[in-house]
Amino acid sequence: MSSEMASNAILAKARAMYGKCLSDNDYRQLMDCRNVSEVASYLKSRTNYRSVLAGLNENEVHRGQLEPILRQNLYYDISSLSRYARDKSLVFSNFIISEMEIEQIIRCLTLLNIGRADEFVFGLPMAMTKFARIDLKAFSTVRSFDDLLDVLASSHYAAALRKHRPKDGERADISIIEAELNNQNYAMVMEAFDKQKSTRDRDELKDTFSAMLDFRNISRIIRLKRYFNYSAEKIMPLLIPYGKLSKRTVEELCSASDAREVFELARSTYLGRLMSKLKYNDQSMMANALLSMYCKHHLRLSANPTIVMISYVYLKQIEIANIVNIIESTRYGLSPDEKSAMLVR
Amino acid sequence: MSVKKVKAINIIGMLSELDEVIKFCGDSEMFHPDDAMLFYSNTQDFSPLSDKNPYAAPLQSLRSIADMAGLKLEFVKLTDFSVSDKGVLKYVDSTVEKLEKLINKKLSIKQKIDGCKRKIEQVGHFTGGNLDFTEIMKCKYITPSFGRIPNESYDKLESFADNPFVMFFPCTEDDTHHWGVYFCPNEPSEKQNIDRIFSSLYFEKLEVPEIAGTPEEYLKTLADELSELQDEQDKNKKELDEFWASEKEKCMKYYSRLQELDCYHAIKRYVYKYHGSFIMVGWIPADKEKYFTQHLDGIKSVEYSISDGAEEMKHSPPVMLKNPPFIRLYEFFVKMYGLPSYNELDPTAIVAFTYTLFFGIMFGDMGQGLVVAIVGFLMWKLKKMEIGRILIPCGISGMIFGSIYGSVFGFEHALDPVYKALFGLDEKPVEVMDSNTINIIIYGSVAIGIVTIVIAMIMNIVSSIKRRDPESAFFGSNGIAGFVFYVSLVAGLVCQMILEIEIMTPAYIICLIVIPLVLMFMREPLGRLAEGKKKWQPEKWGDYCTQSFFELFEMCLSYVTNTMSFLRIGAYILVHAGMMMVVFTLADMMSGVVGYVIMVVVGNGIVMALEALLVAIQVLRLDYYEIFSRFYIGEGRQFTPVVAGKAEEQI
C-alpha cells in the first residue's frame, strides 16, 4: 500500500516538473536570441535550467559545454522521480537508466574505434554516475574492447557485448551492438509489463509504450528512406521489434518508394487520427511531434505513474533536443522562422 | 449546448487571385485553414507554394527589437489606416534601424558593465594572498594559468593521477567552480597537451596579463570603470524613452498592419499549386456559408465546393463549442480535458450544472461564498484568469447553500432573525452537525451520486450511438446493459431495504440483473457481431472468459466505489462546519475582543482558501473521473480561424 502511494507521488511530481518546462513564450524568446551566449543567458536567468547553469560564463560558453549541462538537468529529474518509483514504476525507471547506460557504452565504443578512448572522461556526465548501475568512471581507463568487457563483466550488458566481440585488429560493429543492447532493454521492459497483475495496467502500459515505439520506428523508416533510400530488407532488422502496428503494416511502410509515401501510408493506420491534429507537414518532424502530443496527453490525463513518468522523460528529452536545435540554428544564423520550423512542440 | 456545425470549403482559382481570396478569408475571421493535401486522393501534381513570407522577418525584427528595448507592442484594430504594403515595410525598417542603434549602444554598455562585474568577482577569488601577478607571470621554466574549473571537471581530475603535470591548486571554491591555478612546463609539446586536457575539462582562464600589480590594486581600477559605465547607461535609457514617447502611437498602427499582412500570408502554408491554379481547403461555420459564397462569387476565376462537416468525419472537422454565456465559462474545464470530437456530445452544460451545484453544496457559507465570488471577479478583471470567471457563479452557489445551512463566515446562527422574519422559524432550517442531519447529508450525497452516474450513462448511450459504437452503446458497463443493471440494482436495494417493498423476485433478478451482467461479460464478441464483423469470436475463449470475469468483477466493484465517491460532497459540508468550530474555539481562547476578531478573520481566511482549493479540485475530480470517464473521449481539435493579432497561437 505504501509503495503504491509512493508511486502515485510520481503523478504529482512529474506534472509539477512539467509545469516548469519551457513555455511557448520561452521558445519565442530563445528563437529571437542572436548568438549562443544570449541563448545561454536566457536559459540561465529565465528558465528552470538556472540551477544547472549557475556559474556558467554565458559570454564564453560553447555548444559542447552547454549540451551536457542541459542533459544534467534531465538526470536530476530522473533521479528525483526515481526516488518515488516503487514496483510498477521502477520498471520504467530502470529502463530509462539502461537507455542512458547504453548511450555511454556506445560512446565509449565509438571513441575506441577512432583511437581516442582517453577522451571518454571529458564527456562523462558525473551526475549520472550517482544512479548508474555500472561503474561509468571506470570507462575512462578503457583502452580496448576487452577492457570494456572487464568493466561490464558483472552487468547484464556483458553477454551481448561478448557476442559481438570484434576479431583482433578489427573495429566493433557499433550499429549491431547498439541495436542488440536496445532490443534487450525493450524486451526486459515488455516482459516486466507482462508481469503486471492488473489487466488494465498491463494493457494501458503496453498500449502506450508500444505506440511510442511505433513513433520511433516510423521516424527511423522515414530517415532511412529519405537519406539512404534503404530497401525493406535492410530497414526491417534496424527497427524495434515491438509496437502496435502489425508486422504486415510495418513491412508495407518499409516497402514504400520514398519518405513521402511512408508518411501517406502512416496516415491510413491508427496514427492517422493523431496526425490530423498536427501542424507539421515536414515528415522528419512528424514522429517527434506525435510523441510530444501523445506524451502531453498522457502526462495530463493518465493515472498510471509509469506512463506519466515515461511521458515526462520523453517530453524533457524533446525539450533538450529543441534547445540544442535552437543553439545550432543560432550558430548558423538562421531566422526565427527557420528555427521555429525545426522545433517540436 | 452542442458542437457548432461547420462546413468544409474547397476553393480553387487562378494563382493571380490567390491574394484576394486569402485577404477575404483572413478579414472574415471565420476561416480555419487545413492541409489541402489531405482532402484529395490523387495529389501527385500538387506542389506547395514556395512563396517566401516577406512580412515575417520585418515583423520578427520589430518584435525582438521592441522586446530588447523593453517596449510593449500591442495589436490595435485599424479602421482608418491606408498605407501601402511597401509603405508599411519601409516604416518598419527605418524604425527597427533607429531602435537598433539605441539598443546596440545599450547592449554594448551592458556587456562592458557585466564584464567589469565579472572581473571584480573573478579577481576577488585571488585577493588576500599578497600575490604580485606581474612577478608571477615572469617565471621562465613554467607557465601558470589562473582561472576556474567546474566542480564536475575537478572531480574528473583524479582520472589523470598517472600524469604528474595534470595538477590543479585550488585557492577558493563556490557552488559551481573551483578557483585556482595549474602550472605546466614551458616545453611546447607538453604545454600543449596539458592545456588541451584542461581546456577539454572546461577550464576558464583568467586574463592575468591585464592585472598589473596585486589583485587589490586592480579591483580599485575596476570600481572606477564601473561607475563611469553606469552613468553612460542612464543617458542611453533617457534617449530611448524620448524616442518611444514620440513614436509609440504611429508604431502601433504600423505594427498592427504588418501583423495582419503576416497572418494572412501564413495561410499560404496550407495552399497548393496545381498547374496555374491554387487549391485551398478550410473550414467555416455552417451559418456563414452564405457570407462566404456571396463574396467568393464576386472573384472571377474562383470556384468552390462546400460539404457538411458530418460528411468529412475522416478529416476530423474542427470543433467550435456553442453554449449560452453562463455555460460557456465552463468550456475552460472541457478544453483542459480535451475538446469533443465533431460527432461527440458536448459535456459543457453538464459540467456547468454539476460544478456549480456541487461547489455550492460543499462550500456552503454565505459570507465566504461572497468573498470567493468577489475574488473570482477580481482574478478575471485584473489578471484575466479564466478560473476567476468560474469562481463567480460558484461563489454565488456557495452563498445560496450557505443561506440554507444558515452559515455566515462560520457564524452558524447569524441568519436566525431572517428565518424568523421571513418564514416564522425559531432558528435555521438545517443544522448540519445534528446527528439526524448528518445521516440525511450522507444519504443525500449517495443519491446525488446515483443520479449523476445514471445521467452520465445516458450520455454515453446517446454518444456511442452517435459514434456508431454498438459495443459501448448496448453492452458496455456504461451502455444499456450497464444502465439496466445499475438502475435495477439500486431500485431493488432501495425498495427492499428502505421502502420495504419486495420487488427482488427471481424474474426481476434474472431479467434485470443477471442478463445485463451476461451481456456485459460477452460485450466484445457481441459488439463485433453488432458491427457485422465476420471474425466476431475471441481468439481463445478460455483466455477471454478469464479476462472478462476479472473485468466484470472490477466493473461491479467500481459501480460501488464510484457511487461512494460522491460521499465527499457530504463530507465537505461537515468539514466546513467542523473547521469553523475549531476557529471559534481558538477565538474564544484569545484574550480580549481584538484577539477574538483577529482569530476569526485569520481563521476564516485560512478555511476559505483551503476549502475553496480543495472543493474546486474535488468537484473537478468528480466531473473528470466519475462523469467524463463514462462517456467522453475528448479527442477533437479546436476550430481556430485565422484572426490577425492572434496569429501566433493560431497558425
Image (spheres, coloured by chain):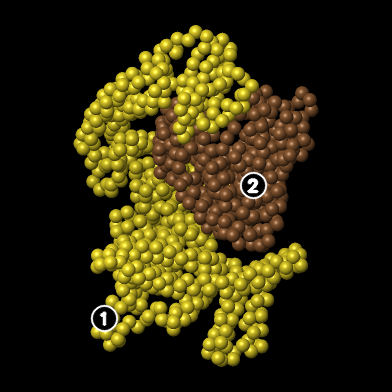
Chain colours: A brown, B yellow
Q: In which quarter of the image is residue B375?
A: bottom left
Residue A133 lies, in percent from the top left, at 66, 41
For the question of whether residue B6 can be seen, the reply is: no
The answer to whether tags 2 and 1 share a subunit is no
Count residues near mark 1 (Cα–Cα under 10 Å), then give few for <14, some for 14-19, many for 20+: some
Where disc 1 sits, the SS reads helix
The disc placed on residue B418 is 1
Residue sitting at 47 percent across and 71 percent down?
B568
Chain designation of label 2? A
Mark 2 vs mark 1, CA separation in Å: 65 Å
* Residue bearing the label numbered 2: A94
Is A282 on the left-hand or right-hand side of A256?
left
Residue type at the position of mark 1: Val
Chain designation of label 1? B
Where disc 2 sits, the SS reads helix
For the question of whether residue A8 can be seen, the reply is: yes
Residue A248 lies, in percent from the top left, at 71, 50
Depth order, front residue of B632/B588? B588
Residue A94 lies, in percent from the top left, at 64, 47
Residue B350 lies, in percent from the top left, at 44, 70
Is B85 on the left-hand or right-hand side of A163?
left
Is the N terminus of chain A in the top left, top right, bottom left or bottom right quadrant?
bottom right
Residue sitting at 54 percent across and 47 percent down?
A80
Residue sitting at 66 percent across and 53 percent down?
A244
Residue type at the position of mark 2: Asn
